Structures are given as C-alpha cells and as structure tokens.
Amino acid sequence: MSGSLLVTGIGELVTNSPGSGDLLGAVADAAVAIGDGVVVWAGPEADLPDEHRGGASIDVGGRAVIPGFVDAHTHLVFGGDRSDEFARRLRGESYRQILAAGGGIHATVAATRRASDSDLIADAAARALRMLASGTTTVEVKSGYGLDTATEVRMLRAAAEVDAATPIDVVPTFLGAHVVDRGSDRDDYLRLVVGEMLPACAPLARFCDVFSDEGAFTVEEARIVLEAGLAHGLRPRIHADQLSHTGAAALAARLGAASADHLDHATPEDAAALREAGTVAVLLPGASFSLRSSPAPGRMLWDAGVTVALATDCNPGTSYVESMPLVVALACLEMGLTPAEALWGATRGGALALEMPDRGWIGPGAIGDLVVLDAPSHLHIPYRPGTALVDTVIKRGEIVAGLRPEADR
Ligand code: NIG
Ligand code: FE
C-alpha cells in the first residue's frame, strides 16, 4: 500500500527535522508532497515547486500536521480483559499482590491460551484500528501472554496478521520471559525460553524483551535471555525498573539495548548510562496513571540527555490505553515534559526506539505517514486531554482514517 498525495494549507507543520533550530522543526503555512508513499518535498507552501502540483491533493484549511505516532511498546495481542482486577486495585489491592496470587499476567495467559486464532487476530486488529484513528501509524507488539512455545508463536503470527490486515505497521517483539509460567520451575522455564521458544519465535520477531523486576526475572536472568536473543538476531529491549529499582536499566545500557522501558525508579546514574549507550528510554505514563503510582522521572531523563520515547504500553492489566494523544498529555501533566518534548518523544523518539530511522519525521526520504489535527497547533494535544483531535490519518501517502467523512475532505 502506497500512494501519492499533496497536502496543502497546513497552518503548522511539525517536521522533527534535525538542524532546524527548534526541536519540532515547525514550519508555518506549509505543504507536503508524498510520492509512492515517501515524502518528496516539505516546506513553506509559497516555495512548493510546480512539479509537485497536479496530482491528488487535499487542503487541510490551516490545521496542524504532525508525523504519525510511533507507539514503541504495546502488548496488543491478548485474550480476555482484567476489568475485575482494575476494580480490585481501586479498592486497595496492589498489582504485585494480584500477580503473586496467580492473577495479573497469569490471568491473561490463561485467557490467551483459550482464545482462538481468529479471536486473537480480530480483537488485536480492532485495537490497532482504534490506534490508527487516534494517529498511530506504527506500533510495536509483544508476545508474552503465551508462556508456552505454541502460544507465543500464535501471538506473533497474530501480530503479523494485524500488520497484513490493517494499514498500521506492526513491529513484533518476543517476550517469552514475561513471567515464569505458573507451576513451572524457574530454571526449567528459562531453559524453555532459551532452548525452545527463542528458536521457534526468532523468525517471527525483530526484538527480544524481558520483564526484569520483583516478581518477574532477575537482572542476571534477563541478561541470559537477551544474550540468547542476540544470538538469534533479535535486538534487546527491557521492561526495566518499573515496580522497583533492580538495575535492569544499567543492564540495558551494558548490552547496548535498543530501549529500556518504564524506568519509573530510574536514577541519575541510570540516566547517564543510558545516554552513554545510546539506549532509548521508553516512558509509559499510561501505566503509572492506571496503577496510580509515581510516574517515571521523565524530566530528569530528558535533562540528562537521554533519548526519550513515549508509548501506550497497551495491555489488559496496567495500561489499557490505546491513545498516543492521551499519552502525550500525561507526559506533560504527570512527568513535566513540554508539549514539544512529549510530541517529539511520541513520534521521532518512538521511531528511534524501534531503530526505524525512516519515520517519526517529515522531510524528503521519510515515510509518508502524516496526521492532520483538528486544531491549529500541536499544543492542543496535551491541552485538551481525552478529546478526539485527529482529523485525517495518512499512511504511506494514502488517507486511511479520520473524523470527517471522505466527502467532506
Ligand atoms: O508493561 N510490566 C510488565 N508487563 C506489562 C504488564 C502486563 C500485564 O499486567 O498484563 C507492562 O506493564
Ligand atoms: Fe509492557
């Protein structure tokens, strides 16, 4: 799927182009030309060369245009839901208590094993299409609710089906080391992950992730899994220092991981290590919001020079959040990022976390993934939390979603 489209009448164009002075590389009164799914020109409309006129075009009437959101951390494929646990947590039980008692991730594992392939695919595709309608054009999707080889493989195949069946690009991650399966011996389970799941899942994934925390895997266990993943060609990323400070962010830096995610308990020393390693900090404010816990120190990480990305962590337990605009608002209001920093993190930061340099920005050579906001400025995203502000979504130069019916565009 790819198309050619000229977008004119852009009141504010967020390019994220490096070297333009301000972080967002914003251009007023702009136009963007997309040819065969790739941006071929972007800049002030007054400078638009004639060669880009004459084909399909839309005038967005002074609205703001941003790059498509890149959601770099989700658990999009799962069976069932955990609304009952949500209500229990509001009455005082903790996430860790529920997990230790065999609920939490284990409850979703049981529901995922029971679900048919077609239900897993249909439910995940429905979530992906809602994400697309809120401006997400690329989404990372993890396995990790199978905890046996057959179900981990089914989850990654379902992720591939969502990629094929919807306009959204899906980036698959193997998370066999999410928690130790109930009733399994720890060492046996690790041997299963490394010896059987990884060889079966590696051809279906691009990254290998581990949940390293109290109640999940130790830093040493995470190292073993991630090094085995590397041997199978999977780049590492880690659920790090979410519930407690375990040292997993430091491990991410030592391994040169693509990202360290969550980081609610990260320290200034962790920040220095991540910056030196070039490991992206993927922050998930929907999780701390839903758990009513302290958010990650986003301001500290940004000021320390770490590359920061923002993602939904969409999952049935800690963050059933599909909306990147809501995540941008939470990053501003709960973590103290500026609107520009938060938007950059949700677009360019996410692309860097997924090691996809062709997206998260708008300029010649970038993928033609654009979001037209029903607002004059990107500031409206955090300023109006929870409001549907996406007017039109353009994926590889084709209009794929939006608020307005086709006839009104
Ligand atoms: O990113 N922290 C571990 N994994 C998920 C939660 C998964 C779940 O509770 O189902 C997370 O928050
Ligand atoms: Fe997660």
Image (cartoon, rainbow, N blue to C red):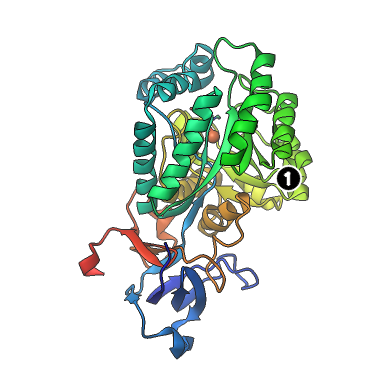
Quarter holding the N terminus is bottom left
**Which residue is rendered at x = 48% and y = 46% of the image?**
333
Q: Count the labels in the image.
A: 1
**Given the image, on which type of amino acid does mark 1 rest?**
Leu
**Which residue is rendered at x = 63% and y = 72% of the image?**
21
The percent position of residue 164, horizontal first and vertical second, equals 42, 49
SS at badge 1: helix
Q: Is residue 349 left or right of residue 86?
A: right
Residue 79, located in which quarter of the rendered image? top left
**Which residue is rendered at x = 77% and y = 43% of the image?**
273
Q: Is residue 195 visible?
A: yes
> Image height check: is 46 above or below 309?
below
> Image height check: is 315 above or below 277?
above
The percent position of residue 288, horizontal first and vertical second, equals 51, 34
Residue 405, located in which quarter of the rendered image? bottom left
The percent position of residue 385, horizontal first and vertical second, equals 38, 49
Residue lying farthest bottom?
50
Q: Is residue 312 left or right of residue 353?
A: left
Q: Is residue 210 visible?
A: no
> Image height check: is 391 above or below 198?
below
Quadrant observed for ligand 2 in the rendered image: top right
**Which residue is rendered at x = 44% and y = 35% of the image?**
77
Q: Which residue is mark 1?
A: 274
Quarter holding the C terminus is bottom left
Q: Is residue 116 left or right of residue 47?
A: left
